[in-house]
Image (cartoon, rainbow, N blue to C red):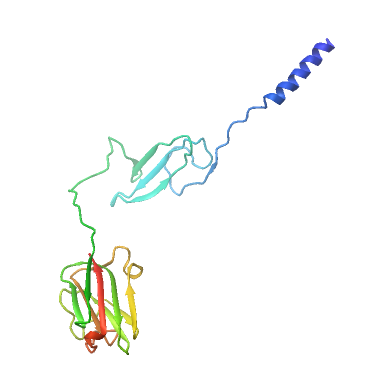
Amino acid sequence: MNKLFLWFAIMATVIGFACPAYAAPVSPKVSEPINHTTSQPIGGMDDDRNPVTLRLDAATGALLTMTSSGTSGGSSVSILLDGTIVSSSNPLPVSGSLTLVSSDNTTFRDDGTATKVVVSAAAGNLISATCYNISTGLKYLQIFDTATAPTAGAVPKLSFLCAKNAQIYVGNDVFGKDGLTMAIGIGMAISTTYETFTDAAVANEQFMQAVYK
């Protein structure tokens, strides 16, 4: 009996070293999303199969939030419209026609022929504007929402200082990624005063460029 017990003890020790106890894999910790509409809580130690949820704005269709909790196990995706999951019985509303609009920009330049110019006689977006001032005095690059050349005394939409013998470039850091919206047209001028257009500069001492769409 003692020999049999000793044999069992030895075998148990050998098996223990050869086959360590099974440990279930541990999923990574997933941070709590800002918004979610799943029926179970998302976060903490998940099972790697929690869904990804997209939340859309009902009025604009814009993506408000996207939460992802699945990792290696594959995830389902739900799109919500005002809190209701989009499905065949609750489809996304689609109306109107699809219009393709060219994103090509147009360039404009005036190499010292005028102190006031019409960049575009139609509404558009001003992407960037440049002024090179080779005079010995301060000048102001002024932007006007107009379809005709600015006139003396006109109030600009924006006015930028251009130092003597210097160049100024104004781009999307000021106008935004889509450009400055101009409802009527795009006009530019070189002024000797900041607040209004004073047409006292010498044309061939300043050069203007613009990019618009």
Question: Percent from the top left, x then y, of residue 3?
Answer: 83, 12
Quarter of the image for the C terminus: give it.
bottom left
Q: Which image quadrant for residue 192? A: bottom left
Q: Which image quadrant for residue 8? A: top right
Q: On screen, 64 above or below 129?
A: above
Spot the residue most to the top. 1
Left or right: 111, with 70 as reference point: left
68 or 109, which lies in front? Answer: 109
Left or right: 91, with 118 as reference point: right
152 or 40, which lies in front? Answer: 152
Quarter of the image for the N terminus: give it.
top right
141 or 144, which lies in front? Answer: 141
Question: Percent from the top left, x then y, of residue 134?
Answer: 30, 85
Kindly identify the residue that appears in the image at 28 percent across and 73 percent down. 129
Kindly identify the residue that appears in the image at 36 percent across and 44 percent down. 83
Kindly identify the residue that appears in the image at 23 percent across and 60 percent down. 104
Q: On screen, 55 above or below 205?
A: above
Question: Percent from the top left, x then y, of residue 82?
Answer: 33, 46
65 or 23, which lies in front? Answer: 23
Q: On screen, 155 above or below 84?
A: below
Left or right: 109, with 31 as reference point: left
Spot the residue most to the right. 2
